[in-house]
Image (tube, grey):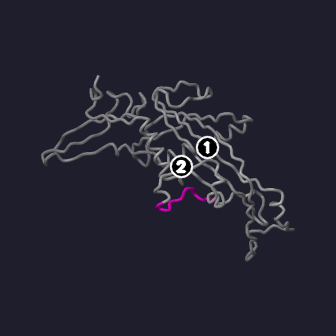
Amino acid sequence: MPFTDNCDLYGAIHEDGINLVVRHIMRQRPSLFNYGTADVAGNREQWCAKVEYTADVKNYGNPIFTVESYLPVLGADSPPVGLSFCAQLTEAKLDFHPSNAVALPAELSPPLKAQHFALHLRICASIGCPSDKEVDRIQPTSTSPRTSDVGLKQPPPVILHGKLNCFCLDVFAVGHFEHVSVLGKDSLMGKVDDLDIVDIKPDALEANIICYLKTALNVILREKLTIPLEKFFFSFSLLGLATVSFFPTPNPPIPNNPAVEKDQLKVFLTMKVGP
């Protein structure tokens, strides 16, 4: 059956194409996927994983890492103390139903459900663990500064450097696309339904990390990757005689639009010709 039996225009993108684009972006804009403090960003030996990037990154002086503030030691304010850290997203792979590019763990109840997608992320990170000698550089004080003290001079922060003992986590997620109303506009949004991290103990620690990562993914999808459906609408004049317009084909006759199936994200459009 032709793809256009129930619509006038059909388009699709294969998961292999999306994954290829993601790999290109990771090489062209590595700073979007690698984060760390200044001392880590400037020292390749401190990186948790090798960063592959194109010659243009070096030729144009683009950053490899996004430099972040030092990780504060909670409760230390006289003086404040910061630690080095490194966080890198080393792998990102998307898999449309049916699942064949990402092997889901048993906790996510494979196989992948119809009209769903799977996601595999590999995250490597570490905190710089200072030696006792580093910690001994901090001079203890008898009182802590109070923010209410007008004109009180804050002590400069102390940055503790140390060896990074890196670890890597394999994160798996499953989700779907849904239609939502955003600022009065009908929009398309990806949503993560469930998430699992391989081999994290104890269970409560795993639950807390999963909660954070699931929340972060859904917030990023909501803020950065929500697509107004009007993007799929377009029209043009045909020789000045008529206007040709395209819009998403409704249900019925198309039960899922866009559709996540056969390793592809598919979109079906209907054409209307008017004055």
Point out residue 81 in the picture as x, y percentages from the top left corner. 75, 62
The quarter of the displayed image where residue 268 is located: top left
Q: Residue at x 43, y 36 (%)?
A: 16
Residue on which the image places disc 2: 52
Per the model, the C-alpha gap separating discs 1 and 2 is 15 Å
Q: Main secondary structure of the magenta part?
A: loop
Who is closer to the viewer here, 251 or 167?
167
Question: Is residue 190 found inside the magenta-colored segment of the image?
Answer: no
Q: Residue at x 60, y 59 (%)?
A: 67
Q: Residue at x 45, y 36 (%)?
A: 178
Q: Amino acid at mark 2?
A: Glu
Number of other residues with Cα within 10 Å of mark 2, as a class: few under 14, some 14 to 19, many 20 or more: few
Magenta span covers which residues? 59-68
Residues marked 1 and 2 touching at CB (< 8 Å): no
In the displayed structure, 51 sits above or below 211; it is below
Q: Nearer the viewer, mark 1 or mark 2?
A: 2
Q: Residue at x 54, y 46 (%)?
A: 219
Query: Quick one: quadrant of the C terminus?
Result: top left
- Count of numbered marks: 2
Point out residue 19 in the picture as x, y percentages from the top left corner. 46, 39
Who is closer to the viewer here, 107 or 92?
92
Q: Amino acid at mark 1?
A: Ile
Residue on which the image places disc 1: 123
Q: Which numbered circle lies on residue 266?
A: none
Report the side of 70 relative to 262 (left or right): right
Who is closer to the viewer here, 259 or 251?
259
Point out residue 3 in the picture as x, y percentages from the top left corner. 30, 28
Question: Is residue 60 found inside the magenta-colored segment of the image?
Answer: yes
